[in-house]
Image (cartoon, rainbow, N blue to C red):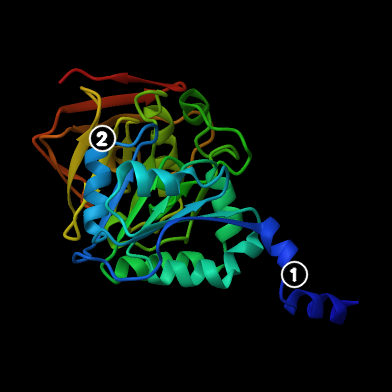
Amino acid sequence: MAMLALLAASLPLSDSVRARALETYLEGDLGGTAPAPVSGGLLLMGGGDHNPDAMHWFIAKAGHGHIVILRASQHGEASTEFYREIGGVLSAETFVTHSKSASYDKHLLDSLSKADGIYIAGGDQARYVRRWRGTPIARLLDAHVAAGKPLAGTSAGLAMLGEYLYGCMDGHSLTGPEGLADPYGKGTTIETGFLHLALLKGVITDSHFTERARLGRLFAFVAKAQASRAADAPPLIGVGVDEAASLALEPDGSGRVYATAPGTGVSIVYGAGIGRVKTPGPLAATSVHVTGAGPASVVRLPAGTVEKSTFERDYAVSGGTFTQLPR
């Protein structure tokens, strides 16, 4: 029986099984080379509607060439958006993976290796974790960035970019009060070991940030991820991106914020004030520093420094809640 199982696992997937595991959608022509130079960069997007300026930055970084969109749910409307609504690309090809087997599909892997720009869509990051873990996809994403090509992620796609990520593995999206009440509990499902991007080393992200009041849960993410690190490792940085905002990082780590709605932007949480000792019960911290960044700011990662910040705040955390301290 073991031999039969091994043999079955080694057999190629039938066309019908492969079709159920992977959907593909294409707009444009896969032939030709990017008409402009391709250059590196990371686009950290907070979810919601796309900021046109941020998308044009990403497409320009991809040399107006071939874009690959990765999804784990929904359908191929992203191809239409990239090719017909935003425009300026040779092709936009969407892959929707419905099982882990799809992550070994030859066409998918070939397209990732040849893409001028890769965009990881929103949805449910637990599906990405389960369907990518131990597959070539993460390796190809690392290689794509190392080759000086741009990578973008929005919402769940943003979560996948950091060295640490919130996996939402139990299917319940953690709230701020829940995270602060039990930061080291089972609900704070922190994963690592997927991507290895130098600009996001020591970084964990969150999206829909201000709109869904997620500052408290980002405190909890940083606390749990940080507690697993070596004693001599530097503190983590949390990066919260609002829905109407995107953080565009150049290869040297300098980044600017694109924001559609006034007052939206990026929040940087510094793990130095949170500590790294697991203690039962609610999170306790006397002073956690948070810096805001807007369109006039310059953010530098992975250091987490912000020039021309929009705000500087400190918070005390105790009893499952946080309070802003006077400055």
Question: Image point 59% across, 69% down: which residue?
Answer: 104
Pair 1/2: label in front: 1
How busy is the neighbourhood of tag 1: few (under 14 within 10 Å), some, or many (20 plus)?
few
* Residue 36 seen by the camera: yes
Which quarter of the figure has residue 9? bottom right
Q: Amino acid at mark 1?
A: Ser
Q: Position of residue 187 (x, y in %)?
A: 58, 37
Residue visible at 71% across and 76% down?
12
Image coords of residue 38 (percent x, y): 23, 65
Q: Residue 271 is drawn in which quadrant?
A: top left
> Residue 34's image quarter?
bottom left
Of helix, strand and loop, which one carries label 2?
strand
Q: Secondary structure at mark 1?
A: loop
Q: Residues within 10 Å of mark 2 (few under 14, many from 20)?
A: many
Q: Position of residue 265 (x, y in %)?
A: 24, 31
Q: Is residue 62 above or below residue 219?
A: below
The circle on residue 266 is: 2
Q: Is residue 296 left or right of residue 238?
A: left
How many numbered badges does the structure rendering display?
Answer: 2
Tell me which residue sits at (49%, 28%) in the image.
282
Report the residue marked by disc 1.
14
Kindly report the distance in space between the C-alpha atoms of the residues bearing marks 1 and 2.
46 Å
Residue 141 lies left or right of residue 187; in this view the side is left
**Of the pair 82 and 296, the residue shown nearer to us:** 82
Tell me the amino acid under the disc marked 2: Val
Residue 82's spot in the image, x, y percent? 36, 47
